[in-house]
Amino acid sequence: MTPLTPGFLAPASMSRPRGSRRIDVYSPKLRRRLQCFGEAIYHQCLRLEADPTVLAYCERPAYFTIGNEKHLADFWVRQADCEWLLFVGDSKPSFIAHIGPGEYEARAVPAAELAAARVWIENWERILPVVTSCQNLLTAPLLDAVRRFVYKPTQLTHIEQEFAIMDLTLVRAGVFTLLHSGRLTAPSLWTEPLSLLTRFEPAEGEP
């Protein structure tokens, strides 16, 4: 296995592509703001943020050269034992990209893949602002209490009822933060809009 590189902490400098919309988003995972140029890049950013197996990522990490052409990767992504580059909206097959001493598998994210994840993406557009706004207000005891209560599939409304004496904004943020960190899961968010009836359950491997 190729050793992991130090990674990328900040995007490469570039001007906004002509005709593209700039979308600013805050990443609770990275604890910084990102600039996404275009809806497709923004949607893939949400997918990376929502995936608890993604430990770190960076938009527009670096340029590399294929032949005489210079290319800018859309994202660098790291999981526990691997890392790669992503090209959004590209249909090219995977290939190996060399940036300095690093060697990375480059993968495509076709438009059809983003379209198939539309409901999931829309749900996380609603979830992430709650996680972000309460990031510094949540306590470990609250998160642990919510996690212990959700020992089986439980509707969001029942979780909020259980903790009704508390600030329900923080209770909901706690549920979403546990989802964001991978301690809870909610499979229906792939196919149904988030609601009070959404069921949350322990993630695989959680006691």
Image (spheres, helix red, strand yellow):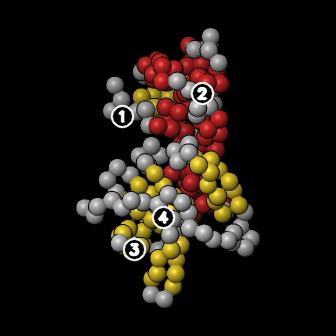
Whichever of callouts 1 and 3 sits on the residue coming sooner in the sequence is 3
Nearest-to-viewer mark from 4 and 3: 3
Q: Residue 1 or 125: which is nearer the viewer?
A: 1
10 Å crowding of disc 1: few (<14), some (14-19), many (20+): few
Indicate whether 185 appears above or below 67.
above
Whichever of callouts 1 and 2 sits on the residue coming sooner in the sequence is 2
Asked if labels 3 and 1 touch by Cβ distance under 8 angstroms, the answer is no
Q: Which mark is residue 86?
A: 4
Disc 2/disc 3 C-alpha distance (Å)? 41 Å
Q: Which mark is residue 1?
A: none
Residue placed under numbered mark 2 in the picture: 137
Asked if labels 3 and 2 touch by Cβ distance under 8 angstroms, the answer is no
| Local secondary structure at mark 2 | loop
Residue placed under numbered mark 3 in the picture: 100
- Outermost residue toward the left in this view: 1
Whichever of callouts 4 and 2 sits on the residue coming sooner in the sequence is 4
Disc 1/disc 2 C-alpha distance (Å)? 27 Å
Disc 4/disc 1 C-alpha distance (Å)? 27 Å
Residue placed under numbered mark 1 in the picture: 204
Please state the horizontal and vertical placement of residue 16, each as a whole percent of the image.
Answer: 69, 69
